[in-house]
Amino acid sequence: MPDSSEVDVVVIGLGPGGEYAASALARAGLSVVGVDQRLVGGECPYFGCIPSKMMIRAADALGEARRVPALAGDSDVRPDWTPVADRIRDEATDDWDDKVAVDRLEQAGARFVRGTGRLAGPGRVVVTTDSGDETFTLRRGVVLNTGTEPAVPPIDGLAGTPYWTNRDAVQVRELPRSLAVLGGGAIGCELAQAFARFGVEVKVIEAFDRILGPEEPEASEVVRASMEADGITFRTGVGVTAVAYESGFSVGLADGTSVGAEALLVAAGRRTNLGDIGLDTVGLDPSARVIAVNKRMRVKGVDGVWAIGDITGKGAFTHMSMYQAKIAVRDLTGDGKPKADYRAVAHATFTDPEVGAVGMTEQQARDAGLRVGVGLAPLPASSRGWIHKVGNEGLIKVVADLDRKVLVGATAVGPSGGELIGMLVTAVHAEVPITTLRGMHFAYPTFHRTIETALDEITER
Ligand SMILES: Cc1cc2nc3c(=O)[nH]c(=O)nc-3n(C[C@H](O)[C@H](O)[C@H](O)COP(=O)(O)OP(=O)(O)OC[C@H]3O[C@@H](n4cnc5c(N)ncnc54)[C@H](O)[C@@H]3O)c2cc1C
Ligand SMILES: NC(=O)c1ccc[n+]([C@@H]2O[C@H](COP(=O)([O-])OP(=O)(O)OC[C@H]3O[C@@H](n4cnc5c(N)ncnc54)[C@H](O)[C@@H]3O)[C@@H](O)[C@H]2O)c1
């Protein structure tokens, strides 16, 4: 075997963006090596978005069935986790086997190496595999897409206990009677509600004073109320001091109380995989939590290195990883245009009600020094909300820059909130004047008609 192979590009880490980039670059005729130490496709298809949304789809069906008595007679709901566990195994993850993804990558013309990649100085990558190290010299460069691991806080007694992270939660076959969830962010809330709707007694512990901290406070409030209606209890604004495990978990809180449960899910944020990928060999800080990139996804301060996905700190979402991957591919094969634009980043949190959001929150707009206007409209007060009745919780909130007379952010909470946000993403992205938005037609009786009410309510604050 030669001392090193020369290739155009190595992609280290094949999350959603890395997988896309490796395939697209190979299809464009470049010689490409894609490297992953685990599964091709990364967190999203095997442990993240897809299995969690299959759980949520099933849980939502139960939630909706329980609403039948308020609208249409009787319903007798007897949850069974088996179809969910089977679906995740058979349809989503092939029992956590990535053969299909590896084949797809190779058919695109890339070479796949299962191993741990690291930078080894400018223009060089070393991959450690089961059969030894392989070195690549790069004609064009390297794309980093190493993503994240679940962050496990250094809580006294936690290490060594059989706690779950998201990676365990999506593989569960037998549900516990009770579950404590450490962290009321997107992962904690989505999974908490899914398990609760299957009959698990769920208790969420959140250090911040409200759940879904990055969302608008109004969104946190509506989602919390709905989750409480599912029987979930919350301890917010209180730190965790210790965890003990015997036949079950006991989570000690800073106010002297404790929470007991059969199982414990740690959903306390993510840690980026940057510490051991040789950043120092190209003059970058290996202790950095995120990697700084320019608008073409080139890593700042170094030639021939691109970075995409969660490690860039621009939003830990699959669609961000894919968006950035397309830019990196354009830069490696063309002129890199259009460049990255983060004014209208959108996301959806798949609780019931769903939270769709785009751009700035009210607080972020204020922090940016804008003259802020806010319009708020509750969904239940709309015709569609009133007709919908049970399960109609939600609201539309729009955040305006009153000087430029455009929206800079918006939140839609409600049935299909992640879909409702769509037209507001266009409004923020394209900077559509508020007068133009107010002059649109809004079909009656739809949920999106509440956007018109929110626009009419915009006042300075
Ligand atoms: C439970 C859960 C639910 C989620 N739901 C959603 C959702 O609904 N919508 C959404 O948009 N996002 C969601 N996310 C976030 C989403 O999964 C991530 O943003 C997405 O996977 C993009 O990550 P990434 O491209 O940065 O890489 P990742 O998906 O994290 O993949 C990184 C890959 O790099 C590999 N790797 C790391 N280091 C090395 C190395 N040195 N050498 C070789 N390989 C390496 C890893 O094995 C991994 O395969 C969810 C996440 C979780 C955990
Ligand atoms: N639908 C989606 O798009 C979706 C779904 C899930 C995850 N994600 C992505 O994954 C990322 C990670 O999600 P996450 O929920 O793990 O992280 P997060 O950072 O959003 O939430 C973690 C929460 O845990 C709390 N926390 C941290 N340490 C704690 C402690 N010791 N005790 C109690 N609470 C503690 C934090 O205050 C925070 O609210 C999200 O930011 C999001 O970008 C997206």
Image (cartoon, rainbow, N blue to C red):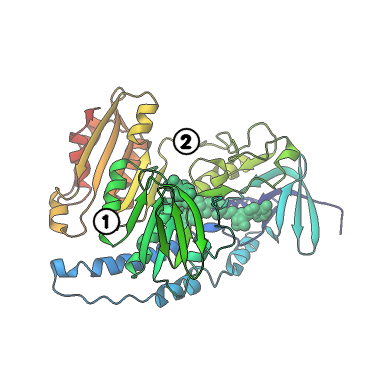
Q: Nearer the viewer, residue 64 or 404?
A: 64
Badge 2: how crowded within 10 Å, few (<14), some, or many (20+)? few
Identity of the residue furthest to the front in this view: 256
- In the image, residue 176 above or below residue 7: below
Q: Nearer the viewer, residue 201 or 360?
A: 201
Q: Quadrant of the N terminus?
A: bottom right
Q: Is mark 2 within 8 Å of ligand 1?
A: no
Which is closer to the viewer, label 2 or label 1? 1
Residue beneath the point at 25% across and 66% down: 64
**Image label count:** 2
Badge 1: how crowded within 10 Å, few (<14), some, or many (20+)? some
- In the image, residue 437 above or below residue 32: above
- Could you tell which of marks 2 and 1 lies nearer the N-terminus? 1
Asked if residue 222 lies left or right of residue 104, the reply is: left
Q: Badge 1 is on which residue?
A: 226
- What x and y, as percent, mark residue 444? 15, 50
Labels 2 & 1 near each other (Cβ < 8 A): no
The reply to whether residue 156 is visible in this rendering is: yes
Q: Secondary structure at mark 2?
A: loop
What label does residue 185 carry, if any? none
Q: Is mark 1 within 8 Å of ligand 2?
A: no
Q: Secondary structure at mark 1?
A: helix
Q: Quadrant of residue 300?
A: top right
Q: Badge 2 is on which residue?
A: 341
Q: Amino acid at mark 2?
A: Asp
Q: Quadrant of residue 41?
A: bottom right
- What x and y, as percent, mark residue 383? 12, 51
Residue beneath the point at 13% across and 57% down: 387
Mark 2 and mark 1: span between their CA atoms?
Answer: 34 Å
Asked if residue 92 lies left or right of residue 454, the reply is: right
Q: Amino acid at mark 1?
A: Ser
- What x and y, as percent, mark residue 110? 67, 57
